[in-house]
Amino acid sequence: METINLTYPLTDEIISKVAKPQILAIGQFDGLHLGHASVIESAVRLAGQTGLPSAVMTFHPHPKEVMKKGDYEGYLTPPEEKERILRGMGVDYLYIVEFNDAFSRVSPQNFVCGMLVPLRIHTAVVGFDFRFGYRGEGHAGMLRELSENTMDVLTVPPYLIDGEKVSSSGIRKALQEGDIQLANRWLGRPYSVKGMVMHGEKRGRQLGFPTANLQPGEHYVLPIKGVFAVRVDCEGNTLEGVMNVGVKPTFHDQATRPNLEVHLFDFDGNLYDKSLRVELIDFIREERKFGGIDELIAQIAKDAETAKQRLKSAVAE
Ligand SMILES: Cc1cc2nc3c(=O)[nH]c(=O)nc-3n(C[C@H](O)[C@H](O)[C@H](O)COP(=O)(O)O)c2cc1C
Ligand SMILES: Nc1ncnc2c1ncn2[C@@H]1O[C@H](COP(=O)(O)OP(=O)(O)OP(=O)(O)O)[C@@H](O)[C@H]1O
């Protein structure tokens, strides 16, 4: 898969590089959940049938971040993570369109005539509730007409689980409420956060539970503060562990931005400056302030046992 950054308006140079008949799935696609997958898989399938390349067009930064909408809390899938997942779906091209104030004011007509038509899109594949252009005034039914019938449009029906439409906002809410099972079911894979291992306060080893402190490189949506059973990908090796996401109220009175720290089972190496991708498998409990260190140590030991059991039953499922 090739990733290509686009800005509006397109330059002649980029048009000559990118324009070709192709099948294009369009959307924000934050999370790349099962609803998004059904749109993208439809595009990849149609590409296979027509012999044309498949492409995905997404926008960065997230429009809600640029428009300063109150409910933006970070990404489920920052660009690097989107690339990793889309590569596994057999997509040929990923177009990342720079979303800024000026782009937010591009009309539906200019988006189609200034972006999709010059790229020679053969078929645009979108979800049933796709909106585009200034104030979201454009919808799927307008795409063909605005392109003056040069482009076909395939609209994908809603992907539902238990009667509910799978959505990024539903997944964000589930993570923040600690319903990791629901978030993972809607994603079709475990939610994961990637970052580098940084130096912490060096207290973990004294407690008998050394932890790798993770510094997410990008602005991820963080789950509820608490303890999770996790699977970790460290440079291609899979490890298991228990993670605390929180502010360690036992030691700190002041609330700070939550830390992510992972205690890996059966591991005794040096992880500093390594990159870890931590998959949240299950939520165990909320973070608490303990009366003393012994109480905290006893609880962490229990958490580790619970995490091992949950990881075992997750494999058996
Ligand atoms: C599984 C696990 C659960 C934890 N739960 C809590 C908790 O409920 N409350 C708390 O104050 N700290 C909790 N901690 C954080 C510990 O206080 C922390 O690991 C310790 O302070 C070491 O921090 P350091 O790595 O910065 O040295 C937990 C840590 C782990 C690994
Ligand atoms: N459950 C779904 N079934 C089918 N298509 C979907 C589904 N969810 C999103 N889409 C489509 O995927 C594309 C990207 O949508 P978008 O990222 O806005 O989805 P979303 O998950 O509903 O987001 P949010 O919850 O933030 O509104 C759009 O074309 C949209 O119509």
Image (cartoon, grey):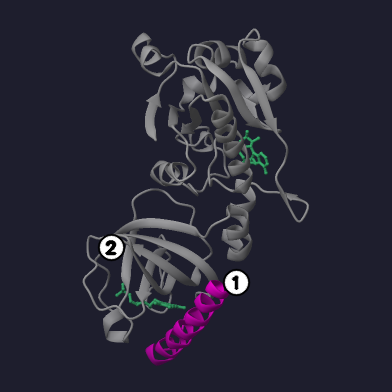
* Left or right: 123, with 231 as reference point: right
Residue drawn at 57 percent across, 24 percent down: 50
Left/right placement of residue 223 relative to residue 195 reads: right
Quadrant position of residue 286: bottom right
Q: Which contiguous range is marked in magenta?
A: 288-317
- Residue 35 included in the magenta stretch of the image: no
Residue under the point 50% across and 71% down: 226
If the image is split into quadrants, where does the N terminus sit?
top left
Viewer can see residue 106:
no
Judged by its main secondary structure, the magenta piece is helix
Quadrant location, ligand no. 1: bottom left
- Return the mark for residue 317: 1
Q: Quadrant of the C terminus?
A: bottom right
Q: Amino acid at mark 1?
A: Glu
Residue 133: give x, y in percent of width and height: 59, 21
Residue marked by disc 2: 197
Q: Nearer the viewer, mark 2 or mark 1?
A: 1
Q: Amino acid at mark 2?
A: Val
| Residue 186 rendering spot, x and y as whole percentages | 62, 54
Callout 2 secondary element: strand
Residue nearest the observer in this picture, 234 or 53: 53
Q: Secondary structure at mark 1?
A: loop
Which one is nearer the viewer's eye here, 155 or 68?
Answer: 155
Q: Is residue 227 above or below residue 91?
A: below
The image quadrant of residue 231 is: bottom left
